[in-house]
Amino acid sequence: MTAMTQTLNETPTGSRLHIAIFGRRNAGKSSLINALTNQQAAIVSEVAGTTTDPVRKAMEILPIGPVVIIDTAGIDDTSALGEARVARTLRVLEQVDLALLVLDPMVGANGYEADLAARITGRGVPLVGVVNKIDIHPDDGEMVAWARERGMAVTSVSAVTREGIELLKQTIIKNAPPAWAEPSILGDLVRPGDIVVMCIPIDKAAPKGRLILPQVMAIRDVLDHDACAVMVKERELKYTLQNLGRPPKLVITDSQALLKAAADTPKEVLFTSFSILFARYKGDLEEMVRGAMSISRLHAPPAAR
């Protein structure tokens, strides 16, 4: 387990709803991400093609919770490097949960927007049309109609003056995937009323009075599933287990106290480590185990002659 300390609001990227912003160069995508995050998250310039690689910014949109907003390069980039930039933009589709298609009423919509909209909806990704620049082009009816004809929810905004940004956030909330939910760390292992004991050695690398993020997230997940979280240091684990009144459902320990905690935990009690829980939380633990078990069957390549 790493000793790196993180604050509670640093939710791992993989646990956040991914929202990507697509559109032409100079449609106002970077200005839009700045308006949504209320920060200078992306460089804004009148020079076409300023954004060359996807830019990610973490924030929260309540009641969805933590999200990652991704700014992408323009889909109409025909420069010498444009093909590579557009390819990187399209690869973002593989990791996005909701897409915003920025429409520029000063330019209109044609094959670029239609093709991208078809790609997004073809992957089953919810798509919201965002008609930008209404501060300088208030007649947005044609763009709104274009988006609605393709089944999009649509909102008109000015990324510069922030007009319509709050309405856009509400539209994002309404169109977020209904089945999306932050993955559970251990919710499938416990039931309401269960006791979970966490053996937490004092980490010298953590600031005084602080827990590292995985421990905080595990505690919160236990509480979210109406179970009881009990925290002890490794020296108190055995005494605590003997005096709980009933066996806990699960004991979790830090890797540095694994052997002692395992020896102090009754065999009938589920036992694991924060490292294993978070390996499962962030990836496919079963596949990882199969890969680890295959290592012994690997053969070294023949020596070069």
Image (cartoon, rainbow, N blue to C red):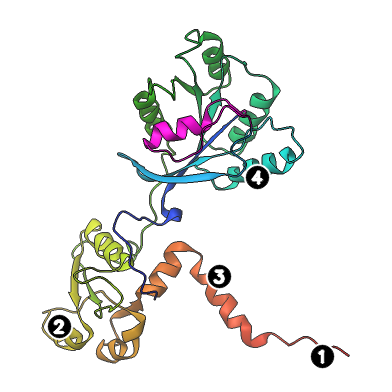
User: Considering the numbered disc 3 on the image, is that residue within a helix, a strand or a loop?
Assistant: helix
Q: Residues within 10 Å of mark 4 (few under 14, many from 20)?
A: some
Q: Which residue is mark 4?
A: 88
Question: Vertical placement of 30 versus 235: above or below?
Answer: above
166 or 279: nearer the viewer: 166
Q: Residues within 10 Å of mark 2 (few under 14, many from 20)?
A: some
Mark 1 = which residue?
Answer: 303
Contact, CB < 8 Å: mark 3 with mark 1? no
248 and 173: which one is in front?
173
Q: Is residue 217 above or below residue 20?
A: below
- Left or right? Give the position of 25 relative to 262: right
CA gap between label 4 and label 3 equals 28 Å
Q: Quadrant of the N terminus?
A: bottom left
Specify the segment rendered in magenta. Answer: 24-48
Q: Residue 282, percent across and down? A: 45, 62
Q: Which image quadrant for residue 160? A: top left
Q: Earlier in the sequence, mark 3 or mark 2?
A: 2
Helix, strand or loop at disc 2? helix
Please name the residue that numbered disc 3 is placed on.
287
- Residue placed most toward the observer, 264 or 102: 102
Q: Position of residue 202 (x, y in %)?
A: 24, 79
How far apart marks 3 and 2 lie (CA) works out to 35 Å
Looking at the rendered structure, the secondary structure element under dot 1 is loop
